[in-house]
């Protein structure tokens, strides 16, 4: 089945730094989603991308849907301590079933004040 | 409006027992999906229900089952628990719009001893 490869696995940065993480696949996705999960909670949707080449922002977060439809990246600018958590990329399989998302393994972000 | 709620939040069972987890979707949402999250396998899709019918199923053994009621509330059941079933079980609901996305509950943390 389709898989999502997320990198890096973890990041440890200083407060104020910018962060970049990405997600790739060997097959195409028609929708890319970025979620953040805090400890003991469920994932919360950050950004949804529906069109190849689309660039979308949500506050300090910016995400892009790759032109090849096989990748996406998420940038966080001027990181703050509350950015700590696990970031997941996800997407519905090309075979259909929007409600059965495929998730990447996650990028664990730690922010040092 | 209220988000997705899951009960109980924490559960401890022993091997061989069975367990039932409950999920109440966002009001008006008729699609409910279940995911299992473990450190080793990450987030994996279990099954999806829509209007009381199972619409999609992930690659899990028959010990995992679910159902949905007429008020869209859903339950999942795991019979003959194994140690490897210890995980965070997440429920997500989704609305009608084609651009609507899944909203996750806080999860039920199941520990099998």
Image (tube, rainbow, N blue to C red):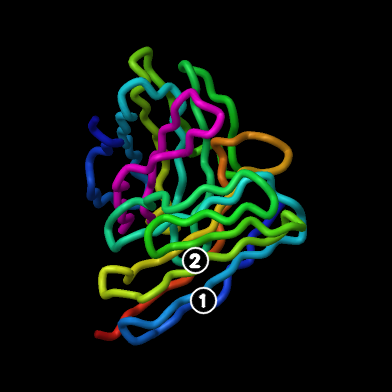
Percent from the top left, x then y, of residue B92? Answer: 41, 38
Q: Which residue is mark 2?
A: A106
Q: Residue at x 47, y 16 (%)?
A: B51
In the depicted view, which residue is nearer to us: B94 or B107? Answer: B94
Using the image, name the chain to which the residue with label 1 belongs: A
Q: For the C terminus of chain B, which image quadrant?
A: bottom left
Q: Residue at x 53, y 60 (%)?
A: A63
State yes or no: residue B97 in magenta: yes
Give the vertical position of A5 relative to B50 (above or below). Answer: below
Magenta range: B87-113
Percent from the top left, x then y, of residue A82? Answer: 26, 69
In the depicted view, which residue is nearer to us: A58 or B8? Answer: A58
Could you tell me if the residues under marks 1 and 2 are in contact, i.e. CB atoms within 8 Å? yes
Instruction: Say which quarter of the image contains residue B54.
Output: top right
Q: For the N terminus of chain B, which image quadrant?
A: top left
Of labels 1 and 2, earlier in sequence is 1
In the depicted view, which residue is nearer to us: A22 or B67? Answer: A22
Mark 1 neighbour class, 10 Å CA radius: few under 14, some 14 to 19, many 20 or more: some
Percent from the top left, x then y, of residue A72? Answer: 62, 61
Distance in Å between CA atoms under marks 1 and 2 = 6 Å
Q: Residue at x 54, y 36 (%)?
A: A99
Give the vertical position of B2 relative to B44 (above or below). Answer: above
């Amino acid at each position: 089945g389709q898989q999502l490869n997320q990198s890096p696995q973890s990041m440890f940065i200083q407060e104020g730094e910018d962060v970049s993480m990405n997600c790739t696949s060997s097959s195409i996705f028609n929708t890319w989603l970025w979620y953040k999960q805090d400890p003991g909670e469920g994932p919360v949707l950050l950004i949804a991308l529906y069109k190849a080449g689309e660039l979308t922002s949500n506050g300090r977060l910016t995400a892009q849907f790759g032109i090849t439809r096989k990748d996406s990246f998420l940038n966080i600018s001027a990181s703050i301590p509350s950015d700590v958590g696990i970031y997941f990329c996800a997407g519905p399989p090309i075979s259909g079933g929007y409600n059965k998302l495929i998730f990447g393994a996650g990028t664990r972000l730690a922010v040092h004040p | 409006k209220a988000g997705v709620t899951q009960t109980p939040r924490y559960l401890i069972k022993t091997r061989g027992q069975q367990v039932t987890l409950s999920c109440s979707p966002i009001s008006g949402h008729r699609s409910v999906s279940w995911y299992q999250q473990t450190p080793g396998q990450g987030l994996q899709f279990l099954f999806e229900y829509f209007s009381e019918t199972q619409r999609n199923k992930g690659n899990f053994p028959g010990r995992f089952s679910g159902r949905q009621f007429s008020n869209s509330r859903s339950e999942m059941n795991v019979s003959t628990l194994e140690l490897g079933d210890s995980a965070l079980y997440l429920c997500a609901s989704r609305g009608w719009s084609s651009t609507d996305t899944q909203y996750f509950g806080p999860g039920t943390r199941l520990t099998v001893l």
